[in-house]
Image: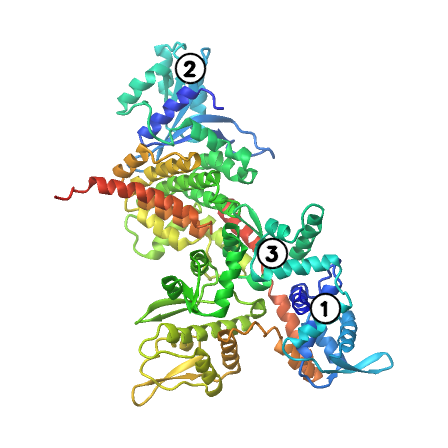
Amino acid sequence: MDSKIAAARCHEIQLTIRDKEVPRFEGIPEIGMAVQLALHIRGLPLLDYEKVKLVASTMLGIPRLSVDRIVHLLAEIDFVQINQTGSRITSILPVIPYFEDLYAGIGEYAKTEAKFDEFEQLTLQIVDSLANSPHNADALANTMGATGSERKAFDSSIEIGEKASFLVSRRARSKTILLNPTYFSENADVFADHVANRGAKSVARTLELVKAAQGWPLSLIISTGEIGGKKIAPDEIVLLQRLAEDGIVKPPTVVTSHAGENQFIFTPTPKSMNISPLRRDLYEKALAIVSSVRQGQLLPNKFKIRSPGAVLYKLKTELQLKPTSDYSEQYQNLVHMRIARLAVLANGYRQLQIIDTPENREALNIAYDIVKGASDVAQVDNEAITAMTGTQEYIESIVSSKQLRERSTVKLADEQKFEIEQLILEGF
Amino acid sequence: MLKDRAQKASALRLAVRKRWLPQMEVDVEPSQRIDRTKYLLTDIDVLAIASSPMGPHSKFVFDCKSGARESAIGRAFWLHGVMARSRSSRGFVILSDRVAISRDHRISASDLGVTLLRESEMEPFAVGLDSSIAPIDSCAANLEAWEEFLEIKGKYPGFTDYLDFSRSTYWMTKSSGEQCRKLVGKLRRIRAEIDPGKREHLAVFGDALCLFLHAVSELAVDLFLLLLRPASREEYSDALLAILYGGYDNLEAAQKIRRIALGAEEEEPVSIFPDMQRFEHLIREVLQAPLQALPAALMARELAFRNLTGAPETLTSREIASEYSYVSKFVVLAASYLVKALRLPPEFAEIYGSQVTAIQTAKLGSTSIPSQG
């Protein structure tokens, strides 16, 4: 496996296990934490180490005792410079590289230092295979050569994965299907059923096509058998239809008088967008923006949008579009979601004007990334970054509110929810 | 291998010809469980459900004994107890021709609601009911299909809980609302195991569809008598939920548990039945022709066993389709409700839906006026 990808997978695993102790892991959490800390201190000035420690342990899921070890690791690959008095670190200066170089640097270190034992390598391979599509557990074990005595290690890796919640297993059509919740947390049932019925490749291919043309209208995919100019097989269209019909999370819909009701298809919401209700909300806003622009591009009324990227760029930078007599219906959802208003001008034309709030600007950025096909880069907790550079009081207020929030949101696990529903159906 | 086969086969044929819904080998459960382990009381050879012009369906039980040493009146006394437990209105004891039955015994049995018959008396008895026990092209009346269905439990242990319920608890349950709700719960429990690619699993879905239509047929009649003309959607919806949960108190308790589990506010509406909107629509459609839902259940049984055995389309299924015009609609709606609400693989609804539509469409074609030229 590419060392960059291995580092990214460690980070995904670390995000789900956070400060839970997984006895058989050492390299994975270490590398995962290194990526997590590096992402959050990238681009920051000289940092008071005490604050870094506090934020790392309360907000980034890095146990306080491990922070020193992670910082030394980053120093070893020249990602931070350490200032210390005696053996005590007083401050650190982040010099973290941008873009993929961050993962490449940490990944390379893990590789040369042989950080992963055999069991961890197997786990990373499993998690990586599941990033593109859920798999039938038996089929995956066979393709990875985990047969006979090797199967035992495979099964215990799955068991740990489930307990630490970086893997989910579901039963569908009498088969056990494994899912990576980072990519397939929503509509897991539909994906599991499709894999049980038509295999993992079908899901992987479909999502690859959707990823290259996010927000394509379902009706157009069905009528042309294409998505973004590429052929899509009938089996794969079935998956998209089921996601739209049976999925718990429905695709955004735009209703216009000239083209009726249309659903716009996206890849599943990345887990980083599901971390908090606020981020989820931002992501939903971004999807609504992309859907409206795709409507103008692919199912226009009179005037067609030629370049959705250019329209989004204009919205991002100028916060408004040229007034026309044409587009008010397609942007109606943005008005409902308080992203924009449709101002009526003296000549009767309407102009789309973004309501200027930090959330709406962020939603536009995400929308632009989605259309440009950028992979999910926003795995960063902006609050943590602000906290590290803020005053001591500010950190303390954030930390205490964070703890309060964590305590107040007790959610039922899917399994418990299912059992309660069964109790209500069968128990009376 | 089932015992007393010839008699059971004739009871089955009579039931299907009369469009009663037959159920073979029903285990009779105790009225209440006090022991930790379940001790079954006895079993019913054939249970048949007949629709009544008004109110709940009628249940008939058939007891088949081919031995020469049976005591006819002894069986009648026993069957009387079984009838009480299963709330059946009439019982039939079918005995070998070698057993002598005195007239005094016949009249005493009749006083208990039991008819004593010898094997050779079955045909004249059926003719008297405007029917027959002659061989019939039907999967639901096919003893081998029933045997194959009953063997599924041994083959697929994952379905044990569901199959025990469908063969026993379901038929002992008092109200149609409870039958419907529990059936939906039991099917939901096996949703991850059931695979439309396997013929036995297709039959298990067909069995659930048959029972669901049976429960819905009674529930619709209950609702029809309760609300002749619902004033508003809320009134209709509330009454339906109350019937499903056995009264308003239970309904409120269920809603309370759900709210606590979800962390919802006191007045916040919560859903306590899967896809209630679709269910309401189904029941509303059944109310258009409440007496045709039971034949739809029989059709579902025909299709379930056809899918199990790989048999071709039967004459009986075509007859049911031509006698009852709503049958295909009810089967299609009920199958799609179960699939959508319980998130089962969509092929179940597609397969049953297309089979029943094909049968009824062919009937439509044959009854239309031939074109000229």
Disc 1 + disc 2, Cβ < 8 Å: no
Would you call the spot at circle 3 few (<14 residues within 10 Å), some (14-19), or many (20 or more)? Answer: many
Query: A222 or A421: nearer the eye?
Result: A222
In the rendered image, the vertical position of residue B291 relative to residue B86, given as above or below: below
Q: Quadrant of the C terminus of chain B?
A: top left
Q: Which residue is mark 3?
A: A168
Query: Cα distance, mark 1 to mark 3?
Result: 22 Å
Q: Which residue is mark 2?
A: B73
Q: Secondary structure at mark 2?
A: helix
What percent of the width, then of the height, locates residue A226? 41, 64
Q: Secondary structure at mark 3?
A: strand
Of circles 2 and 3, the one toward us is 3
Q: Amino acid at mark 3?
A: Val
On the question of residue A359 being in view, the answer is yes
In the rendered image, the vertical position of residue B138 relative to residue A291, given as above or below: above
Farthest right residue? A86
What percent of the width, then of the height, locates residue B372? 12, 44
Q: Amino acid at mark 1?
A: Ile
Q: Secondary structure at mark 1?
A: helix
Disc 1 + disc 3, Cβ < 8 Å: no
* Label 2 and label 3 in one chain: no
Of circles 1 and 2, the one toward us is 1
Of the two numbered discs 1 and 3 on the same chain, state the one appearing first in sequence: 1
- What's the chain of the residue with tag 2? B
Q: Which residue is mark 1?
A: A31
Query: Cα distance, mark 2 to mark 3?
Result: 61 Å
Q: Amino acid at mark 2?
A: Ile
Identify which residue is drawn at 31% across, 83% down.
A325
- What's the chain of the residue with tag 3? A
Q: Is residue A403 left or right of residue A244?
A: right
What percent of the width, then of the height, locates residue A217? 40, 67
Q: Quadrant of residue B37?
A: top right
